[in-house]
Amino acid sequence: MDKFSRVIKKKVEKVIDEPVIFENEHMKITQYEDWVIVEEPSIVACLPYLIEYNQVIIRQEYVPTFKKADGNDYFLTCVAGKIEIGETPEQSMRRELEEEAGIVLRDGYQFDFERPLFACKTTTAQFYFCLVPLVEDDYHEVIAKGDGTRNERISKTVKVDTKYLNNLLPSDLITELLITRLKKYLTSQ
């Protein structure tokens, strides 16, 4: 186990001659060594917790990839989205909070990101994730306008009292992880 807890990160040099199998504005699929790799932007994800109201902000989201897998229309997810070119994870998180949850953070609010995790073995995307505990002075609310896509228009953000956390059935691993982190946070307070 010791060898896994002290992994040394190496600088990866890009191989120029990777055959491109498919490419569009969202991803590129390439051949790398003996694997097919999906190269896509990294993702920010958070679970806002409104301390004075004892509420968590969660999404009822239309996700076509999930729908294709199980046929349901809506899924319980956290606030999340891809990091745009030129954005830092912090800038992206602020944008996603405003677009999806209608939360505008005060200048100077600091995120406590956990170590980024890869989404899965076949993609280069990593999750930059954290809980976002908020007191009233940390934010103000606006109308969440989404990113303009159909999926955003038919999805919605809801506030749920934390006493119902055990009743929530998240649809993805990162939302499950963040809800677990919130439960731990609440028991430590």
Image (tube, helix red, strand yellow):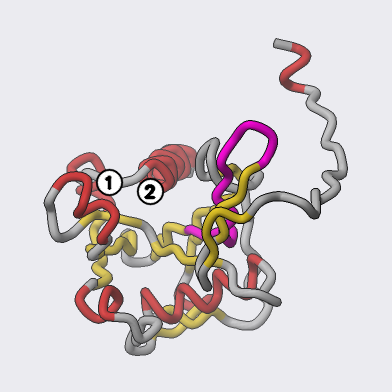
Above or below residue 96? Residue 125 is above
Label 2 Cα neighbours within 10 Å, binned few <14 / some 14-19 / many ≥20:
many
Residue name at image x 27 percent, y 61 percent: 63
Q: Residue furthest top?
A: 1
Toward which corner of the image does residue 140 lie, by quadrant? bottom left
In the picture of the structure, the residue carrying the numbered disc 1 is 170
The percent coordinates of residue 8 (x first, y second) are: 84, 30
Measure how far apart labels 1 and 2 are at the Cα level.
6 Å
For label 2, the SS is helix
Q: Is residue 168 visible?
A: yes
Q: Which residues are magenta?
A: 32-45
Above or below residue 72? Residue 104 is below
Amino acid on which the number 1 mark rests in the picture: Pro
The percent coordinates of residue 112 (x first, y second) are: 63, 55
In the picture of the structure, the residue carrying the numbered disc 2 is 175
What main secondary structure does the magenta stretch of the protein show? strand
Amino acid on which the number 2 mark rests in the picture: Thr
For label 1, the SS is loop
Q: Are marks 1 and 2 in contact (CB under 8 Å)?
A: yes
Camera-nearest residue between 121 and 18 = 18
Residue name at image x 37 percent, y 58 percent: 78
Quadrant (top left, top right, bottom left, bottom right) of the N terminus: top right
Q: Is residue 63 left or right of residue 37?
A: left
Q: Is residue 63 left or right of residue 51?
A: left
Q: Which callout, 1 or 2, points at the residue further toward the start of the chain? A: 1
Q: Is residue 97 left or right of residue 110?
A: left
The percent coordinates of residue 30 (x first, y second) are: 61, 50
Residue name at image x 45 percent, y 80 percent: 98
Camera-nearest residue between 125 and 109 = 125
